[in-house]
Structure formats: structure tokens, C-alpha cells
Image: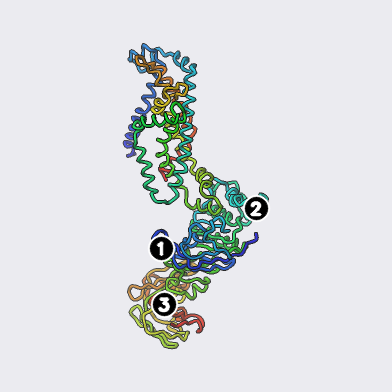
């Protein structure tokens, strides 16, 4: 019984932390149902005269769906490219001893500290020369570059948990190198790979800066993050549409997250617990 | 299953990791179809030998031969070996059946042959009901059997086993020991088995190589290791409870022995006509060659007065620990009907025929047991 004050404090802290996270989302949903005068008046939390008119116009507009499709392309591209690069890299770093192994792994992490904004101008010039401005490939490439380092670290931790004896048993069965990676390492580390892929997908989905820089001239390739941004003009902000677009934009990530939640828990449990 | 009989030999094998010399000057012969056990304490280099033989490590010097083929540069997969790992190393994402089939599929064995071999091996180890399970759904004993079955199914020239029973409980272990021995005998496959457990070594091996500090201290049959240990390490390592080892000043003439140990003088008559140069030796006596009953008699050294400090009653046998000369403890196998209790004053007698004499380097100088011919005198 003596633990109850400690428990209460713990729950109170959790409620406060949850409140901080949920509050902006509540404002977002709340705003989506308010009329313009009510938003301008800014007097009530709960809409006094809820309206669905913005919802019907937003959901009927074809650009919203185009933005979602584009975001899906970019996010999937980032996830696939990240995994394609990070899985072999992490395997070698986790399982092979070579000179500079540790140094390389540390260097990979150091690149994570470079702010993406610093690279925008040189990247723009580089992409212009390679014809990557206005393409999905450009955004996917540069976004992946920023996700790969952390992904390598994450996967190295997962791959190191696979017992060395498994690799030796497979070697005696004639399975080594790339075949071992694909037939044994990937299936046995699957929760970790899903977690890493999900993290890359979310990064790609939420990516804004590179998209706005490299895709701004091609509106047909705008992702939802730019879409939300277009509701805010120089003199006027379409708050309801902005809120609806943002709300709709979070749903796919939420769905992916819910589907993969179990695997994610398994993965995080195994690295943290094990 | 028709086994290709294959002897194994190590000649002058050395292994270095960077500047660290892990093994050097390894010579070892394993005969066709033999069950050879490598036994020794942790870090003595038993597993290193097995890994060299498996092709998981490459020797820096010397040659390793399986059959008539030098395998130094042959990949693990092409050495015609199968290995059972300490952790079993079952493929966790495959069912038991897939685990068993995988190696054969990789070798492009025809499908009907794979099926036949799986059926045969599964029958031998009674694994029918486990075939569709995943390794995570198996108990330790079941996983161990699947691991042995996976090795067996490959029909290798040489079986390698790296402490396959160390994760099992005592009861299961004794059952698994018998099972592995039976399977090996039926398959007739040359087997190299690594363990740190001398009971396992004694019960399973046709021959046992006792390894200490990277070198083979003795390689012989279980009986020879027990009766005629080559040095004091083997003497102390083989047998449970361990052989009593103590320092003594020995003087001997043909038939007569005089021994100064535990601060007293003990006289006795030897069965063997061994003559030992006067000097300090390490004497080894097994618990069954000591007694606390009866008085002095021919062929027994004693009495050695002592005090009983501990009794280990195992039911069928009973070991008593006797403190002699202040600090030394002797383990004595006592009669199971004995009634001695801790604190009792007892007189210990030592059978001369059970005495092993080791010189200052620990090498056996004389085994005074058995026939006269067996007594070796330096």
C-alpha cells in the first residue's frame, strides 16, 4: 500500500506528458470543425456552431488525394532505399572484423549531427546538374541519406543479437555472405527491420524541407506536407483546410503504425530488454 | 545410411589471432569410426580444435586431414562434416522439418532422397511429432535431439559436437549421452566430441584427449586415463570425486616404501618392485584406494591419523573428508553402512597398489598399482 503515492505521481506525470502530445492534435481536430468567425474570435475551445462544409470540400478536392499518393511514393521510396542500403552495411559492421570497423560506425553516427539545412544549397546545385530537381528520386535519395546512418546503428544492434553459431551452422550447410543475409539474418531480425523501415517511412512521410526545395516547381509531385503548407497564404490562412489536410495526412502513418505495432514492440523490447 | 569412414589428423597445427598465439604444435589422430572426446577446463583449446576441423577457423601452420584429403583450404560446407553446437544453432525461422532438410536442399540432394533420409533419421530419434514445430516451441531436450538429427541427416564423414549436452538438466543429460552414443555407434561415423565434463568424456569416448593449457596431456582410453594418468593434471581432472594429491618425501627400495607426508612417517610394503630415488613427489590416491577401517596390513600404508570434517552420503556410496596433518584433506570412499560422523578421529590407510607417483614437473613417475610389470620407474 505504501507504493500508492509513487504510483499516483507516476500516473500524473504520464497524464501531463500525454497531454502535451495530444493537445496540438486536439486543437487540429477542433479547428477543422469551427467556422471562420469562430476561429477569428478565438473564444471557445469547443466549436459553438460546428460545420462540416470544409470537410466535404477538402475530401472532394482531388489534390488532397494526389498529395497523399505522392507522400506514399516518397515515404515508401525512403523506406525501401534506406533498408536496401542499411541492411547490408549493418550486417558487415555487425558481423565482420576489419580495420576501422568501430571508427566507421562512429563516423556514420557523426554524420547524423549535420543539419540538413546546411546542405540545401550545394545539394540544389548537385541535383540540378544530375536532373534530379522536381523528381521523386531526388527527394527520396536525399531523405534516405539522412535516415540511413541511424538505421545502420539500429540494425547493427539487432544483427548483433543473432548468435554467431547460427551463421556458423549455416556456413556448414553451405550458406554464407549475401545468401545468409537474405535467408537467415533478415528473417530472424525481421521485427528490427520492420521497426527500422517504419522509422524511415515516417521520416519520408513527414519530410518537408527537401520537398519544398526540390519539388516546389512541380505541383503534381507535392506531398501532403507541402499540401498543408499551401493553405497558408501571404495574407490569409485557411485554418480549417490546413487542419483537415494535416489530420488526413496523419492517418496513413497511424494505420501503418497500428498494423506493425506488435512487431515494433517486439523489436524495441528485444533491444531494450535484451 | 552408409558412412564414409574417415580418419582425422592434425599435424603441427598452429593458430594465431593477430599476435596472440592460441594454439601451437597440435598433433592429433582420430581413427576411423572412433568416438574421440576432447576434454579439459574452459579455455584449454578444445573448441578451438573443433572449429579448426570444422573449417570455421583456418590454421596458420600445419595440416589438417580428413580421410586422405588435406582440408586446410576447403570451405566448411565442402568438408563433409556436420556439427552440433552448444546452443544447437537451430534456424529459428524454420520448422524442425525445414531445419532438417535445409542442408540437403543446399546440396541439391533429390527430393525423394531427402524425404527418405528425414524419415529415417526422425525415426531413429523419435521426432515425428515435432516436425512442424518451430525451434522456439521445443524444450531444451527436444532442441538438442533435433540438432543431433540435423547433423545425422547430412550423413557426414565426421561428426563434430561442441558441448551439446551442457544446457540440459542432469537427468536429461544422462539419457542424451546414451542416445548420442547409440546413434553414433549405429551410424559408425568418426566423431569428435568436446566437453568440459569428465563424466561425459568417460562414459562416451572410445578414447579421450585430456587438454591442458592448449596441449594434450594424455590421449587414451577412459580406463587408461583413470588407471594410469600421465600427469598430475590428468590425475586430478579425471574421476569424481577427484584423486587426492599431496606432496610427500618418498624413499623406496624394492618392496619397501617409506613416505613422509602430513608431518608424519608412514611405512608400507609395495606390491610393485619399484625403486624410487629419494625425493619429493606428488602422490595421487583415488578415494577408493583409501580406507578408514581395519588395522595395518600388507600392501597398505598407514596409519595416517586424521579428523573427519565432512560426510557426503550418496546412498549407494559414501565419501568422507578427513583432515590430516592440519591442512590436508583426504577424500575417502567409505562403506555405505559406515556410521562415522563429523568430528570423529579416524585412521586412514592407503593402498600402495593404488598410489600414483608424480615428479616435480607433475609427470607420472610410477603407478604402483596392478601387476608388477606396470610399475614404471624413472
Q: Is residue B168 visible?
A: no
Circle 3 — which element? strand
Q: Which residue is mark 3?
A: B358
For this orientation, the residue located farthest to the top is A37
- Quadrant of the rendered image containing residue A131: top left
Q: Residues within 10 Å of mark 1 (few under 14, many from 20)?
A: few
Q: Position of residue A217 (x, y in %)?
A: 43, 22
Query: Label 2 lies in what chain?
Result: B
Q: Is residue A77 visible?
A: yes
**Which mark sits nearer the N-terminus, 1 or 3?**
1
Using the image as rendered, state which of residue B55 and residue B179 is in the foreground.
Answer: B55
Asked if residue B38 is positioned above or below residue B306 in the image, the reply reads above
Circle 2 — which element? helix
- Quadrant of the rendered image containing residue B191: bottom right
Marks 2 and 3, Cα distance to the nearest angstrom?
Answer: 53 Å
Q: Which residue is mark 1?
A: B21
Q: Which residue is mark 2?
A: B119
Circle 1 — which element? strand
Residues behind callouts 1 and 3 on a single chain: yes
Amino acid at each position: 500500500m505504501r507504493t500508492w503515492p509513487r504510483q499516483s505521481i507516476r500516473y500524473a506525470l504520464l497524464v501531463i506528458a500525454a497531454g502535451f502530445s495530444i493537445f496540438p492534435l486536439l486543437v487540429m481536430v477542433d479547428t477543422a470543425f469551427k467556422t471562420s468567425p469562430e476561429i477569428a474570435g478565438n473564444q471557445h475551445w469547443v466549436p459553438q456552431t460546428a460545420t462540416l462544409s470544409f470537410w466535404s470540400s477538402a475530401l472532394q478536392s482531388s489534390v488532397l488525394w494526389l498529395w497523399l499518393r505522392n507522400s506514399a511514393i516518397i515515404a515508401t521510396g525512403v523506406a525501401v532505399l534506406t533498408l536496401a542500403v542499411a541492411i547490408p552495411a549493418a550486417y558487415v559492421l555487425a558481423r565482420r572484423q576489419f580495420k576501422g570497423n568501430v571508427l566507421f560506425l562512429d563516423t556514420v553516427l557523426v554524420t547524423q549531427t549535420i543539419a540538413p539545412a546546411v546542405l540545401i544549397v550545394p545539394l540544389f546545385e548537385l541535383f540540378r546538374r544530375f536532373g534530379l530537381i522536381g523528381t521523386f528520386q531526388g527527394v527520396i535519395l536525399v531523405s534516405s541519406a539522412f535516415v540511413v546512418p541511424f538505421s545502420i546503428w539500429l540494425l547493427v544492434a539487432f544483427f548483433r543479437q543473432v548468435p554467431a553459431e547460427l551463421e556458423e551452422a549455416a556456413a556448414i550447410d553451405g550458406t554464407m555472405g549475401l545468401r545468409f543475409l537474405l535467408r537467415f539474418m533478415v528473417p530472424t531480425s525481421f521485427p528490427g527491420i520492420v521497426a527500422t523501415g517504419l522509422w524511415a517511412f515516417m521520416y519520408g512521410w513527414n519530410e518537408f524541407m527537401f520537398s519544398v526545395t526540390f519539388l516546389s516547381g512541380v505541383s503534381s509531385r507535392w506531398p501532403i506536407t507541402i499540401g498543408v503548407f499551401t493553405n497558408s497564404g501571404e495574407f490569409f490562412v485557411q485554418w480549417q483546410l490546413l487542419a483537415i489536410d494535416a489530420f488526413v495526412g496523419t492517418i496513413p502513418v497511424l494505420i501503418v503504425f497500428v498494423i506493425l505495432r506488435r512487431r515494433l514492440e517486439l523489436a524495441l523490447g528485444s533491444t531494450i530488454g535484451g | 545410411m552408409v558412412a564414409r569412414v574417415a580418419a582425422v589428423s592434425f599435424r603441427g597445427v598452429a593458430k594465431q589471432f593477430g599476435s596472440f598465439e592460441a594454439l601451437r604444435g597440435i598433433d592429433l589422430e582420430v581413427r576411423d569410426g572412433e568416438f574421440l572426446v576432447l576434454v579439459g577446463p574452459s579455455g584449454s583449446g578444445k573448441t578451438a580444435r573443433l572449429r579448426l576441423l570444422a573449417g570455421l577457423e583456418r590454421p596458420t601452420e600445419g595440416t589438417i586431414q580428413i580421410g586422405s584429403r588435406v582440408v586446410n583450404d576447403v570451405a566448411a560446407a565442402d568438408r563433409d562434416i556436420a556439427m552440433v553446437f552448444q546452443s544447437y544453432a537451430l534456424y529459428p525461422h524454420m520448422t524442425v522439418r525445414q531445419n532438417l532438410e535445409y542442408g540437403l536442399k543446399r546440396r541439391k540432394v533429390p527430393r525423394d532422397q531427402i524425404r527418405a533420409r528425414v524419415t529415417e533419421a526422425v525415426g531413429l530419434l523419435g521426432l515425428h511429432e515435432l516436425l512442424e514445430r518451430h525451434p522456439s516451441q521445443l524444450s531444451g531436450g527436444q532442441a538438442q535431439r533435433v540438432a543431433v538429427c540435423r547433423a545425422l541427416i547430412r550423413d557426414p564423414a565426421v561428426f563434430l559436437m561442441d558441448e551439446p549436452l551442457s544446457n540440459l538438466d542432469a537427468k536429461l543429460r544422462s539419457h542424451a549421452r546414451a542416445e548420442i552414443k547409440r546413434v553414433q555407434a549405429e551410424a559408425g561415423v568418426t566423431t569428435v566430441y568436446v566437453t568440459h565434463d569428465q563424466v561425459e568424456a568417460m562414459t562416451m569416448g572410445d578414447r579421450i584427449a585430456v587438454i591442458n593449457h592448449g596441449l594434450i596431456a594424455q590421449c587414451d582410453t577412459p580406463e587408461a586415463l583413470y588407471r594410469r594418468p600421465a600427469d598430475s593434471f590428468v590425475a586430478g581432472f579425471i574421476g569424481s570425486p577427484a584423486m587426492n594429491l599431496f606432496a610427500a618425501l618418498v624413499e623406496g627400495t624394492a618392496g619397501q616404501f617409506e613416505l613422509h607426508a602430513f608431518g608424519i612417517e608412514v611405512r608400507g610394503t609395495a606390491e610393485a618392485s619399484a625403486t624410487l630415488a629419494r625425493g619429493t613427489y606428488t602422490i595421487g590416491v583415488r578415494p577408493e584406494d583409501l580406507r578408514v577401517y581395519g588395522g595395518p596390513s600388507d600392501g597398505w600404508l598407514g596409519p595416517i591419523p586424521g579428523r573427519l570434517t565432512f560426510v557426503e552420503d550418496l546412498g549407494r556410496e559414501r565419501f568422507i573428508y578427513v583432515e590430516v596433518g592440519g591442512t590436508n584433506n583426504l577424500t575417502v570412499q567409505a562403506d555405505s553402512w559406515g556410521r562415522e560422523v563429523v568430528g570423529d578421529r579416524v585412521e586412514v590407510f592407503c593402498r600402495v597398489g593404488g598410489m600414483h607417483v608424480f615428479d616435480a614437473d607433475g609427470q607420472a613417475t610410477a603407478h604402483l598399482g596392478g601387476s608388477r610389470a606396470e610399475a614404471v620407474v624413472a
